[in-house]
Amino acid sequence: MLFHSSIQKDLARSFGATVVVLATIVMTIILIRTLGQATKGSVNPSEVMQVMGLTVIGHLTTILTLSLFIAVVSTLSRMYADSEMVIWFSSGRGLTSFAKPLLKFAAPILLAIALLALFIWPWSNKQIQVLKDRYEQRNDIERVAPGQFQESSGGKRVFFIDKDSPNNQTGRNVFVSSVDGMIESVTTAQQGQIEIHEGERFLSLQRGQQMLRNQQTGDVRITEFQDYQLLIDPSSKMTASDSQSRLVSTLGLIKAPTPVHLGELSWRLGLPLAAFNLLIMGLAVASVNPRIGKSYHLALALFCFVGYYNMVNVGQNWIGSGRTSLPAFMMTLHGGAFCFALTWLLFRHFNLSWRNVWSVLVPRHSKGAA
């Protein structure tokens, strides 16, 4: 019991600290990226924190996997450096005996990673897409903040308006600049309101003028009006965007096994498998000479993590493009990674080296034969 509890307490402290640090870094990066999307008009500025929270939830799989891997490597490396491993080894404990407390500690984390990858990841992506689509498909006058110039959703019209009603249906001091082919128009009006005729949105302007300029010939025509109808939305009905694989539920991916869906499925299934293999690999990585230094362990661990995760992403592209099948890739990558990690762990457990194994498999010739 002392053996298991002491290891699990050290792992819990290291894992908690690592999660806090990585989550803070990821939240900062995502916040900066989300604010950039808000300034470009892709995200509603009032929903920045909501989009950021959903994005962080979607990235929790990577955060938890890396935190668990770093916690295992850093904890065992510290035990090697403080000679605690020597005490456990002298009491009859081998390196493979550490696998049981590690797996017991990591079991709920691995379960959480699997649930996040299979269910929470598509849900968070779908919620983010709904927020973006809802903001993108708002009519142009609703997208304009009072006293600010802003580009329309189509990118061909610039608005300036002082909103006058709480429901954002009317406004005053309206300015609209648009380009249609070679014709550039600038329309100003004292007041405007939204009207819907036969499913199409119009901005009805009162008491204003319009300037039309031909960019090719330079001809200018100015017209004053008392009432002018400006089409701002071809249809008030929201059009559904094309479904993307990352928005489809895991059950939906299984029911529609297209190459793209199978590639997404391989990525989701690969995350918990990668976390398990990295756990075994972390036990082997930490078992090195403590005189080399702790930075060596972490550098080697990060190299293994980055390489493994890159192969998971590459496999998603390969399966999506039809270069390989889902079962073949899963067996090759994750099955091969498990065999490699287990072999590496056994080598460390029995204190073997590749040179010793090679000398056993290929015995040398007798020295005095000549």
Image: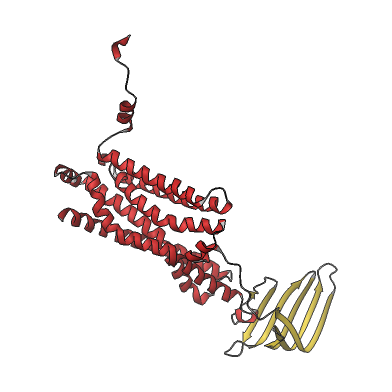
Q: Is residue 252 left or right of residue 208?
A: left
View extreme (top): residue: 370
Percent across and percent down for residue 113 are 38, 61
Task: Name the image colouring.
Answer: secondary structure
Residue 190 visible to the viewer: yes
Q: Residue at x 33, y 56 (%)?
A: 68
- Residue 265 in percent (x, y) is at 49, 58
Horizontal and vertical percent for residue 332? 45, 45
Occupied quadrant, residue 22: bottom left
Residue closer to the observer: 364 or 25: 364
User: Quick one: quadrant of the N terminus?
Assistant: bottom left
User: As rendered, which of 256 and 64 lies closer to the eye?
Assistant: 256
**Snapshot quadrant of residue 172:** bottom right
Q: Residue 95, relative to residue 274: is it above or below? A: above
- Left or right of 105: which side holds 225? right
> In which quadrant will I find the C terminus?
top left
Residue 59 visible, this orientation: no
> Is 101 placed above or below 89 here?
below
Seen in the picture, residue 326 relative to 25 is either above or below; the reply is above
Residue at the image position 47 percent from the left and 56 percent from the top: 267
Percent from the top left, x then y, of residue 19? 34, 61
Residue that sits furthest to the front in the current view: 255
Instruction: Compare residues 120 and 282 and report the one nearer the observer.
Output: 120
Residue ranking furthest to the left: 91
Q: Is residue 102 left or right of residue 218?
A: left
- Number of labelled discs? 0
Q: Residue at x 61, y 76 (%)?
A: 137
Q: Nearer the viewer, residue 221 or 262?
A: 262
